[in-house]
Amino acid sequence: MTGGPVAVPATIRGVREALSEEERAKFIDEIENTPAGDLATVLIRWAMSIPTEHDDEERALVERVRAGDFTGVTFVEDLGDDEYRSAG
């Protein structure tokens, strides 16, 4: 979120291998039963759940957002068209 770039696996195999054994079983079950049109969304959601070196620093921020406190969060819908295109 704020700690800089983080590389996440971009393939089903990469995500599967990065998960714990318990999470891997859940992932395999979900990915094998996901309609083709939803595969990218499911894969990204799982990839984003893989712990990274930034997790300890950002845990409080993530928990705050999960709890529904979106203070300081900018939603793409709130950006102007030009602002959205230049974000990054």
Image (cartoon, rainbow, N blue to C red):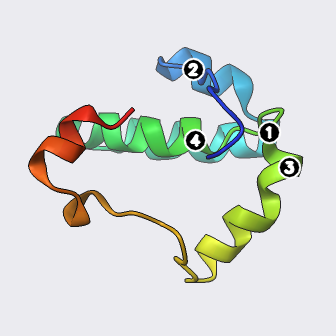
Marked residue nearer the N-terminal end (4 or 2): 2
Q: Which mark is residue 57?
A: 3
**Other-residue count near label 3 (Cα within 10 Å), few / some / many at <14 / 14–19 / ≥20:** few
Q: CA distance from mark 1 to mark 3?
A: 6 Å
Q: How many marks?
A: 4
- Indicate which label's residue lies in the foreground, 4 or 1: 1
Which secondary structure, mark 4?
helix
- Indicate which label's residue lies in the foreground, 3 or 2: 3
Circle 4: residue type? Met
Left or right of residue 77, residue 68 in this image: right
Residue under the image location 71 percent in, 64 percent down: 61
Q: CA distance from mark 4 to mark 1?
A: 12 Å
**Other-residue count near label 2 (Cα within 10 Å), few / some / many at <14 / 14–19 / ≥20:** some
Residue 78 or residue 21, whichever sits in front: 78
**In the rendered image, which residue does mark 4 sit on?**
48
Circle 1: residue type? His
**Other-residue count near label 4 (Cα within 10 Å), few / some / many at <14 / 14–19 / ≥20:** some
Marked residue nearer the N-terminal end (3 or 2): 2
Left or right of residue 82, residue 66 in this image: right
Which secondary structure, mark 3?
helix
Residue under the image location 72 percent in, 38 percent down: 3
Contact? badges 3 and 2 (CB < 8 Å): no
Q: CA distance from mark 3 to mark 2?
A: 21 Å
Contact? badges 1 and 3 (CB < 8 Å): yes
**In the rendered image, which residue does mark 2 sit on?**
9
- Indicate which label's residue lies in the foreground, 2 or 1: 1
Left or right of residue 61, residue 66 in this image: left
Circle 2: residue type? Pro
**In the rendered image, which residue does mark 1 sit on?**
54
Marked residue nearer the N-terminal end (4 or 1): 4
Farthest residue, direction bottom: 68
